[in-house]
């Protein structure tokens, strides 16, 4: 499986709030510091928390964190009503996949604003 396919599977999982897509990810690599199984457990909890707010699917917008990981791809997830739900770094480095929440808050809307 190529890197783009793995990233697409992770995003698809977020969009549907369904971890079953993650079963197709390779098992022989780490996702941040998590094994595939640990990633599935972590996102299962995250998705359950989101669903408890009566949200059943998400929309995605490409994002950026200029603070922690400015060179990595980030994605912001929203409800149908354009309400922000979460932001995750989902990217591939030379050594591993990065799949981790980005908790930074928007400071400014201009191009020089940090962290987005």
Image (cartoon, rainbow, N blue to C red):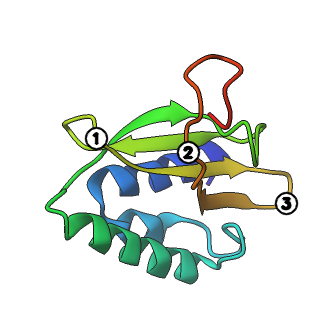
Gap between marks 3 and 1, in whole Å?
34 Å
Gap between marks 1 and 2, in whole Å?
14 Å
Q: Is residue 10 above or below residue 5?
A: below
Which residue corresponds to mark 3?
Answer: 95
Q: Secondary structure at mark 1?
A: loop
Residue shown at the point (48%, 55%) measured from the top left:
10
Q: Secondary structure at mark 2?
A: loop
Of tags 3 and 1, the one toward the viewer is 1
Q: Which of the two discs, 3 and 1, labels the residue nearer the N terminus?
A: 1
Instruction: Residue lying at the far top in this picture: please name it.
Output: 110
Gap between marks 2 and 3, in whole Å?
28 Å
Which residue corresponds to mark 2?
Answer: 105
Which residue corresponds to mark 1?
Answer: 83
Give the camera-side residue of 95 and 70. 70
Kindly indicate the quadrant of the structure image that contains residue 21: bottom left
Q: Is residue 95 left or right of residue 112?
A: right
Residue shown at the point (28%, 41%) measured from the top left:
83
Instruction: Residue lying at the far front in this picture: please name it.
Output: 107
Total labels: the figure holds 3
Image coordinates of residue 69 in percent, x first then y, are 76, 46
Q: Secondary structure at mark 3?
A: loop
Q: Quadrant of the N terminus?
A: bottom right
Q: Is residue 81 visible?
A: yes
Labels 3 & 1 near each other (Cβ < 8 A): no
Residue shown at the point (70%, 75%) measured from the top left:
28
Q: Which of the two discs, 2 and 3, labels the residue nearer the N terminus?
A: 3
Image coordinates of residue 102 in percent, x first then y, are 59, 53
Q: Is residue 8 left or right of residue 70?
A: left
Image coordinates of residue 78 in percent, x first then y, are 33, 42
Q: Quadrant of the C terminus?
A: top right
């Amino acid at each position: 499986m190529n890197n783009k396919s793995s990233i697409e599977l992770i995003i698809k999982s977020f969009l549907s709030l369904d971890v079953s897509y993650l079963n197709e990810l390779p098992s022989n690599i780490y996702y941040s510091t998590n094994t595939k199984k640990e990633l599935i457990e972590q996102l299962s909890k995250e998705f359950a928390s989101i669903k408890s707010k009566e949200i059943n699917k998400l929309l995605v917008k490409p994002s950026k964190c200029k603070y922690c990981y400015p060179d990595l791809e980030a994605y912001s997830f929203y409800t149908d009503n354009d309400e922000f739900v979460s932001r995750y770094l989902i990217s591939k480095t030379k050594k591993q996949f990065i799949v981790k929440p980005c908790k930074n808050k928007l400071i400014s809307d201009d191009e020089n604003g940090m962290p987005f």
